[in-house]
Image: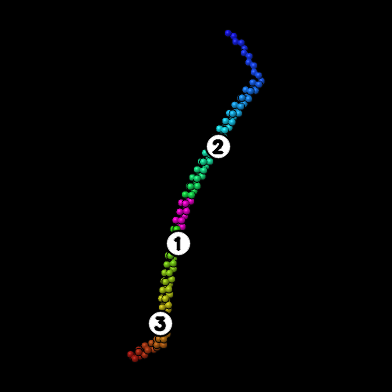
C-alpha cells in the first residue's frame, strides 16, 4: 500500500480567519489571566491590609496596656515618694522642734547659772573686805591664845 501525498489548499481568507480566531482566543486567555491576576493581587492586597490593620490594632492595644501599666507604676512610685517626703518632712519638723526646745532649755539653764554665778560673785565681792580681814583676825586669835 502506498500512500499518495495529499494536497491541502487553504485560502488566504481562511488562514487569516483562523489566525484571527487564534488571536481572539489568545486575547481571551490574556484577559482571563489578567483578570485572575488582578483578582489575586486585589485579594492579596486586602489580606495584607487586614493583617496590617490587625497588627496595628494589636500593637496599639499592647502599647496602650504598657502605657497604662507604666502610668500605674509611675503613680505608685510618685505616691511612695510623696509619702516618704511627707514622712521625712514631718520627722525633720519634729527634730527641729525637739532641737529648738532642747536648745531653749539649755539657754534657760545657762541664763539661770549665769544669774547664780553673778549672785555668787556679788556675794563674794560684798564679802571680800571681810575675807581680807580673816588673816588679821586669825593672827589676833593666835595672839589671844598665847
Where residue 13 sits: x, y (%)?
66, 21
Sequence order check, earlier mark of 3 and 1: 1
Where residue 142 sits: x, y (%)?
35, 89
Q: Which residue is mark 2?
A: 42
State how far apart marks 3 and 1 are (Cα). 51 Å
Q: Which residue is mark 3?
A: 120
Examine the rendered structure and indicate whether residue 79 appears above or below residue 100.
Answer: above
Instruction: Examine the structure image and report whether residue 72 is included in the region drawn in magenta.
Output: yes
Quadrant for the N terminus, please.
Answer: top right
Main SS class of the magenta portion in the image:
helix
Q: Which residues are magenta?
A: 66-78
Residue at image position (65%, 19%) is 11
Nearer the camera: disc 3 or disc 1? 1
- Tag 3's secondary structure? helix
State how far apart marks 2 and 3 are (Cα). 113 Å
How busy is the neighbourhood of tag 2: few (under 14 within 10 Å), some, or many (20 plus)?
few
Task: Name the side, left or right, on which 32 lies relative to 79.
Answer: right
Where residue 145 sits: x, y (%)?
33, 90
Nearer the camera: disc 1 or disc 2? 2
- Tag 1's secondary structure? helix
Residue in the foreground of this view, choosing between 123 and 57? 57
Residue 29 shows in this picture: yes
Residue in the foreground of this view, choosing between 136 and 70? 70
Tell me where residue 87 sits by quadrant: bottom left
Q: Which residue is mark 1?
A: 85
Amino acid at each position: 500500500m502506498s500512500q499518495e501525498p495529499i494536497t491541502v489548499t487553504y485560502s488566504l481568507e481562511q488562514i487569516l480567519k483562523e489566525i484571527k480566531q487564534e488571536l481572539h482566543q489568545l486575547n481571551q486567555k490574556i484577559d482571563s489571566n489578567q483578570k485572575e491576576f488582578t483578582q489575586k493581587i486585589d485579594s492579596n492586597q486586602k489580606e495584607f491590609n487586614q493583617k496590617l490593620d490587625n497588627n496595628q490594632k494589636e500593637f496599639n492595644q499592647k502599647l496602650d496596656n504598657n502605657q497604662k501599666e507604666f502610668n500605674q507604676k509611675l503613680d505608685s512610685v510618685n505616691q511612695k515618694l510623696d509619702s516618704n517626703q511627707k514622712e521625712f518632712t514631718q520627722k525633720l519638723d519634729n527634730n527641729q522642734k525637739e532641737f529648738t526646745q532642747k536648745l531653749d532649755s539649755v539657754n534657760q539653764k545657762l541664763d539661770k547659772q549665769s544669774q547664780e554665778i553673778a549672785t555668787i560673785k556679788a556675794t563674794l565681792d560684798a564679802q571680800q573686805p571681810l575675807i581680807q580681814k580673816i588673816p588679821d583676825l586669825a593672827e589676833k586669835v593666835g595672839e589671844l591664845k598665847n
